[in-house]
């Protein structure tokens, strides 16, 4: 919708925000109307209309088998759109249209924001299955008419009350119609069942919904007056009622078709099972964080034991043993950093820039402050399966640079840069490009990465190519030092 609005219309960003707010709410109008909705906007030159959004009803058959978004029609071809735009009123005149042998009644509802009409909602009702309406359908249609008048008057949707269509209760979940005093005029079967699960033993119709709901909600003190007002439909609000064995999500929508509140709609949904699963996930998340915490503690214990063993090696008998143990301490420490970060998160993803900076701190001990290590760019958020081996790769490459690129007393800088490549259009996955460059003495003459016998470089190649599925290379840097380059694939959907 953003692209169509900006390409074809003269609406500004605040108008576009209002249209997004409308589209986030109009599933309600489609379901109450048993009709398809298409949002038409006049083009910048005023000679055509462009359809920028479409919604099909969950409560009845569709009038459009094809997607209408992006269609352009000249002004004059659809007189209802012209009248709604020019006169700023709901237009219902005209005979039904016939589409593929299906009669369709079309109505045009102007979309008003403050004093301006931004566009028109075409409400298309499939008349093929029209029958004698039940009380539920009559209540739906009357409520839809009230909402349509509010849209035409610019009083719906409610500013600052954008609701996600995936989580808000829908008409079919449970529907109540209240009068101006908050008394229930109509209750759908699903709504009545939800209140029965809360403990109501009688019919809802005729009861004041606010006090009734407050009495059913478990309380340890005085009646919750805010819940009474919300359930009475005085303001557009949402809440959840936890009845112990049952959790009901409730949403109030005041009806003000002519400026004065004549009643309200209450949408509700039984979310008991959903909340139970969320509690289970929270428990599992806490368990996973505790596991990461214990793994981190165990790794730190292993590192401490290795460090203690290194100190007990006699200088005359070392033969590189102490250095090998200290390298092992750093490798274990880099893994421990990742697990410590994971223990603080709700999911298996980490902000890798924080891990990188902590690895830098660990490497600073090795350089004794002679060589500066700095980072440019951002690694971003990585999943644990990538973060753990990548932290070891950085540790090995930095350790290799500090030990071999500089001699005793030398100073210099090692720069780690990271950037994200755009996602591949076919695979939908991006790439992480990492460069570690020093300004030291450079690679030895005749260096061949494939034939390198260094344990650290062998570990890096195994992790990058085998575990991460990427590419690794070492080559002379323009400054005369050494540059290590990593090209790593990222899973689709990872930031």
Image (cartoon, grey):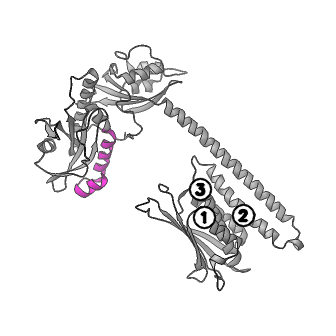
Q: Secondary structure at mark 1?
A: helix
* Mark 2–mark 3 distance (CA, rounded to whole Å): 19 Å
> Could you say which quadrant of the image residue 26 lies in?
top left
Q: Position of residue 289 (x, y in %)?
A: 64, 46
Q: Which residues are magenta?
A: 1-26
Find residue 461 and report its horizontal and vertical position in percent.
63, 69
Q: Percent x, y for residue 37?
A: 25, 40
- Name the residue located 47 percent from the left edge and 62 percent from the top edge: 430
In the rendering, at what x and y percent does residue 307 appear?
A: 80, 62
Main secondary structure found in the magenta portion: helix
Q: In the displayed structure, would residue 79 be above or below residue 389?
A: above
Q: Earlier in the sequence, mark 2 or mark 3?
A: 2
Vertical order, 222 against 77 (above or below): above
* Of the pair 80 and 115, the residue shown nearer to us: 80
Q: Nearer the viewer, residue 413 or 65?
A: 65
Q: Which residue is mark 1?
A: 466
Q: Earlier in the sequence, mark 1 or mark 3?
A: 3
Mark 3 sits on what residue? 385
Circle 2 sits on which residue? Answer: 330
Query: Which element is circle 3 on?
Result: helix
SS for dot 2: helix
At horizontal 63% and vertical 53% (from top left) the residue drawn is 341
Q: CA distance from mark 2 to mark 1?
A: 22 Å
Q: In the image, is 380 to the left or to the right of 178?
A: right
């Amino acid at each position: 919708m953003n692209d169509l609005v900006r390409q074809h219309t003269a609406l500004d960003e605040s108008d576009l925000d209002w249209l997004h707010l409308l589209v986030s709410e109009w599933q309600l109008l489609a379901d109450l109307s048993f009709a398809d909705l298409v949002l038409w906007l006049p083009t910048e030159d005023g000679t055509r209309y462009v359809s920028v959004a479409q919604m099909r009803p969950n409560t009845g058959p569709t009038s459009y088998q094809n997607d209408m978004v992006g269609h352009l029609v000249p002004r004059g071809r659809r007189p209802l759109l012209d009248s709604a735009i020019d006169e700023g009123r709901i237009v219902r005149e005209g005979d039904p249209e016939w589409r593929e042998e299906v009669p369709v009644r079309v109505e045009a509802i102007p979309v008003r924001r403050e004093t301006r009409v931004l566009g028109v909602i075409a409400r298309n009702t499939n008349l093929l299955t029209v029958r004698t309406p039940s009380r539920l359908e009559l209540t739906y249609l009357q409520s839809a008419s009230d909402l349509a008048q509010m849209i035409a008057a610019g009083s719906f949707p409610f500013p600052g009350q954008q609701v996600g269509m995936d989580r808000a209760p829908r008409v079919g979940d449970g529907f109540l119609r209240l009068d101006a005093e908050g008394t229930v005029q109509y209750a759908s079967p699903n709504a009545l069942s939800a209140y029965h699960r809360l403990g109501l033993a009688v019919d809802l119709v005729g009861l004041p919904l606010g006090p009734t709901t407050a009495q059913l909600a478990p309380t340890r003190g005085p009646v919750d007056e805010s819940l009474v007002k919300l359930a009475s439909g005085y303001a557009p609000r949402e809440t959840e009622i936890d009845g112990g064995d049952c959790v009901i999500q409730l949403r109030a929508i005041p009806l003000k078709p002519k400026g004065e509140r004549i009643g309200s709609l209450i949408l509700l949904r039984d979310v008991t099972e959903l909340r139970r699963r969320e509690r289970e996930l929270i428990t599992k998340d806490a368990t996973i964080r505790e596991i990461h915490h214990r793994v981190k503690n165990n790794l730190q214990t292993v590192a401490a034991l290795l460090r203690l063993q290194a100190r007990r090696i006699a200088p005359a008998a070392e033969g590189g043993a102490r250095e090998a143990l200290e390298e092992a301490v750093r490798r274990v420490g880099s893994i421990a950093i990742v697990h410590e970060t994971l223990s603080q998160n709700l999911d298996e993803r980490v902000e890798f820039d924080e891990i990188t900076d902590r690895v830098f701190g660990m490497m600073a001990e090795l350089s004794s402050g002679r060589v500066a290590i700095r980072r440019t760019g951002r690694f971003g958020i990585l999943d644990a399966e990538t973060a753990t081996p990548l932290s070891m790769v950085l540790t090995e490459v930095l350790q290799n640079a500090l030990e071999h690129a500089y001699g005793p007393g030398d100073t210099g800088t090692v720069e780690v840069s990271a950037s994200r490549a755009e996602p591949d259009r076919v695979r939908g996955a991006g790439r992480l490009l990492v460069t570690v460059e020093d300004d030291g003495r450079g690679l030895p003459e005749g260096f061949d990465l494939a034939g390198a016998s260094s344990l650290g470089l062998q570990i890096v190649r195994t992790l990058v190519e085998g575990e991460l599925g990427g590419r690794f290379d070492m080559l002379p840097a323009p400054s005369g030092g050494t540059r290590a380059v990593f090209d790593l694939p990222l899973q689709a959907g990872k930031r």
